[in-house]
Image (spheres, rainbow, N blue to C red):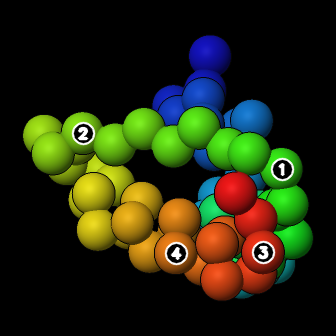
Amino acid sequence: MSNTPEAIIEFGDARDPAVHAMWDQFEPMAIAHRIKHPVLVLAAEQDERIPVTHMQQFVEKVRAAGGN
């Protein structure tokens, strides 16, 4: 059995520049300009990983690009 965390096995090691670059393509702020259909965005003030302000910025970017 390996001591490597399952997330690294499944998604790759983000410390590797090639893996990091690949995942950057899917980062919500990087694709917000392509979203044109309605999106349900939920945020919680207690979420320690994704601040509400990040969700607000995402919504603003989607709307600025003509999305709903």
Give the vertical position of 3 relative to 31 (above or below): above
Residue lying at the far top in this picture: please name it. 1
Q: Give the x, y percent position of residue 14.
A: 61, 65
Give the mark nearer the N terminus: 3 vs 4: 4
Q: Nearer the viewer, mark 2 or mark 1?
A: 1
Return the mark for residue 60. Answer: 4
Give the vertical position of 39 relative to 1 (above or below): below
Location of residue 2 by image quarter: top right
Distance of mark 4 from mark 1, alpha carbons? 14 Å
Element type at mark 2 = loop
Q: Give the x, y percent position of residue 46.
A: 13, 40
Q: Amino acid at mark 1?
A: His
Return the mark for residue 44. Answer: 2
Distance of mark 3 from mark 4, alpha carbons? 10 Å
Does residue 24 appear anywhere in the picture?
no
Element type at mark 1 = loop
Give the mark nearer the N terminus: 2 vs 3: 2
Q: Amino acid at mark 2?
A: Ala
- Dot 1: within a 10 Å radius of its alpha carbon, few (fewer than 14), some, or many (20 or more) residues? few
Q: Amino acid at mark 3?
A: Gly
Give the mark nearer the N terminus: 2 vs 4: 2
Give the mark nearer the N terminus: 3 vs 1: 1
Q: Residue at x 44, y 74 (%)?
A: 57
The residue that mark 1 highlights is: 37
The residue that mark 3 highlights is: 66
Location of residue 33 by image quarter: bottom right
For this rendering, which residue is in front, 67 or 58? Answer: 67
Residue lying at the far left in this picture: please name it. 46
